[in-house]
Amino acid sequence: VGVWGFRGTKPTRHQVFYNDKSRATVTVRRPHAYLIPAEFTTALENLKAHGIQMETLGAATEFAVEIYKVTAASRARFEYEGHRLVSVNVASRRERRSVPAGTVVVRTAQRLGTLAAYLLEPQSEDGLCAWNFFDGTLKRGTDFPVLRVPVSPK
């Protein structure tokens, strides 16, 4: 496949390899929204930098949520772009939970909703979990800090 790019200020044509053989290793149903604790400021800044829309809860609110429990976590042996990438395995459960005021809500019914899901799912190979945004919380047997709201709370 040929694509146009720039070298300095001159347009140039580049040959690139297109791999259309990628297959998902894990799939999940996209939830209505994600709930992110306010203390994960660098993760929230990253979502904002991507253009993902967010809102903040003004009061504690109860939600029916899906929670991931970390069943295994491992860190890459070598650095890649200044990070030792993390991979996790998780198991999910559902419960009702009161979420405190200040929690950030990321709805997936937005222009970049699929990107939000890709970044916030813990098993995503290139998501925020993999890139060390949640490292302090990723221990076997603990809950992943981002909650999923599977359906709209009517």
Image (cartoon, rainbow, N blue to C red):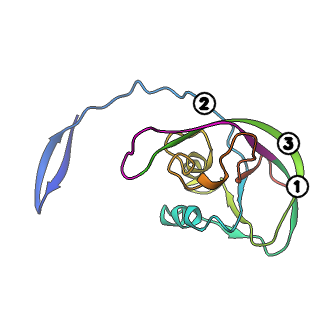
Of 17 and 110, the residue lying toward us: 17
29 versus 146 height, above or below: above
Residue at the spot of label 1 = 97
Q: What amino acid is labelled 3 in the image?
A: Arg
Residue at the bottom extreme of this rendering: 58
Q: CA distance from mark 1 to mark 3?
A: 9 Å
Residue 43, picture quadrant: bottom right
Q: Is residue 52 magenta?
A: no
Residue plotted at (56% across, 56% down): 133
Q: Earlier in the sequence, mark 2 or mark 1?
A: 2
Residue 124 spot, x, y in % from top left: 56, 40
User: Mark 1: which secondary structure?
Assistant: strand
Magenta segment? 66-82
Q: Earlier in the sequence, mark 3 or mark 2?
A: 2
Q: Are marks 2 and 1 in contact (CB under 8 Å)?
A: no
Residue 121, picture quadrant: top right
Residue at the spot of label 3 = 94
User: Mark 3: which secondary structure?
Assistant: strand
